[in-house]
Image (tube, grey):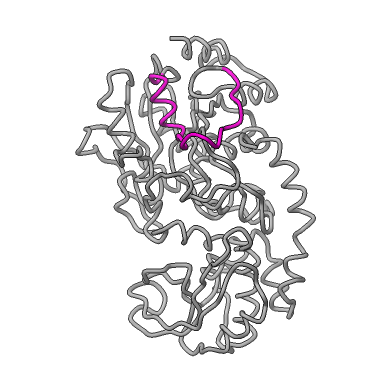
Amino acid sequence: MRGHVSRRRAFGGHRMKLSRRTLLATTAAVAAGTGTAQAAPSRGGRLRTGFERLAADGYALLDGERVGVVTNPTGITRDVRHIVDVMHADDRVDLFAVFGPEHGFRGTAQAGGSEGRYDDPATGLPVYDTYLKSGRPLADVFTASGVDTVVFDIQDVGARFYTYIWTLYDCMEAALLAGKRFVVLDRPNPVTGRAALGPVLHEEFATFVGRRPIAQAHGMTVAELARLFNGEFLTAPVPLETVRMSGWRRSDFYDASGLPWVPPSPNMPTPDTALVYPGTCLFEGTNLSEGRGTTRPFELLGAEGIDGRWAAAAGAEDLPGVRLREAYFTPTFSKFQGRTVGGVQLHVHDRAAFDPVRTGIALLVTARRVWSGFAWRSDNWIDKLTGSARVRTMIDAGAGTDAVVAAWQEELAAFRRTRAQYLLYR
């Protein structure tokens, strides 16, 4: 098939060594297996995901390959069938294995868990666990699976510390080590791709909630991130192809996509959660509840002993696009399980004006100011979430929101310049 021939010419199977510049030029051109550059997506038609375009092209990009898919419950079609089930039933695809990230392929595990190695009851396919695996151990998993091409299709939420993008990074690195080809099927960034926001990770603070120096809210799709990882961070470029969306523009929120929302993880129930998450997830680094164990995780924040003074102080910060309501709630699990706590609920009324990272910083600053019980987690998890010790030490020293936000602007500007080279949608 034409797509298969084009790919072989571009990459020469798995053995040809190409320069980073050649590979980046090739990955920019390849879309849905046609091997030709695509025009910017039109606003007129409905959005089509990378998988929809791959399937519409008859899976030409995967012709003759034994395929393994890195995915989770978000890897669905518009009619909510899982792409693994769809491809397994299609004779045009030689689907050989599935690789599950944190929470698992079918999504049975909570935060910090996975499903392990098993055979999928629905398809009989072997499912391999990628969670907390990287480098050579993960490369060995790909080798043992017998696949030729690793395909990635997972819905991201737009924040550096959401671990699926680092599953993407780790799988790209492992595919490089194992001599496998890598294909990314794109999906929309649910909180838009307008701009990058927040501090940039410092390398010495790298963990699974941030492998490489990108902004806290990166403003990119997974295919764009894959291009960035390939061009900036991998020791050598992996043979990479991206199947971009059509009908998506950078200003679109998730509801403009027309796609069903499947929670990417148990505490990401709605696109509204994703909207606030790049800022309020910082409360994981404190002794306050970030709303886990409630029906509005990351929109509800609080602790025992907090009253209406916090909502009043945070409201006085005049944060754009959001109103803060005094709230009381009882988490069913996680921090303060079964105990009534006081705090705030975020109500975003203008998504375009809302800045989640600035809002998160303002809430930290004011919580520390009005509540004597405020404390950081003893392991300084906040430093891993923000990417350095700067936010914690500045807030401890009494810095206000404006000063903290100003402190990362130079590094953010540098990241934005780098990011611009890898964007697929204008």
- Of residue 53 and residue 12, the one placed in the foreground of this image is 53
**Residue found farthest to the right:** 410
Which range of residues does the magenta coloring cover?
Answer: 36-59
Q: Quadrant of residue 406?
A: bottom right
Quarter that holds the C terminus: top right
Q: Is residue 103 left or right of residue 303?
A: left
Looking at the picture, how far across and down is residue 43, in whole percent? 55, 37
Quarter that holds the N terminus: top left
Whether residue 138 is in magenta: the answer is no
Q: Is residue 301 left or right of residue 82?
A: right
Looking at the picture, how far across and down is residue 340, in whole percent? 38, 85
**Residue found farthest to the left:** 121
At 55% from the left and 12% from the top, the residue drawn is 12
Looking at the picture, how far across and down is residue 203, in whole percent? 68, 51
From what the image shows, is residue 168 above or below residue 67?
below
- Of residue 378 and residue 24, the one placed in the foreground of this image is 24
At 31% from the left and 34% from the top, the residue drawn is 84
From what the image shows, is residue 182 above or below residue 213?
above
SS assignment for the magenta stretch, majority: loop
From what the image shows, is residue 356 above or below residue 137?
below
- Of residue 383 and residue 400, the one placed in the foreground of this image is 400
Q: Quadrant of residue 209?
A: bottom right
Q: Is residue 251 left or right of residue 187?
A: right
From what the image shows, is residue 350 above or below residue 313?
above
Whether residue 47 is in magenta: the answer is yes
- Of residue 141 and residue 320, the one placed in the foreground of this image is 320
Looking at the picture, how far across and down is residue 261, in whole percent? 39, 50
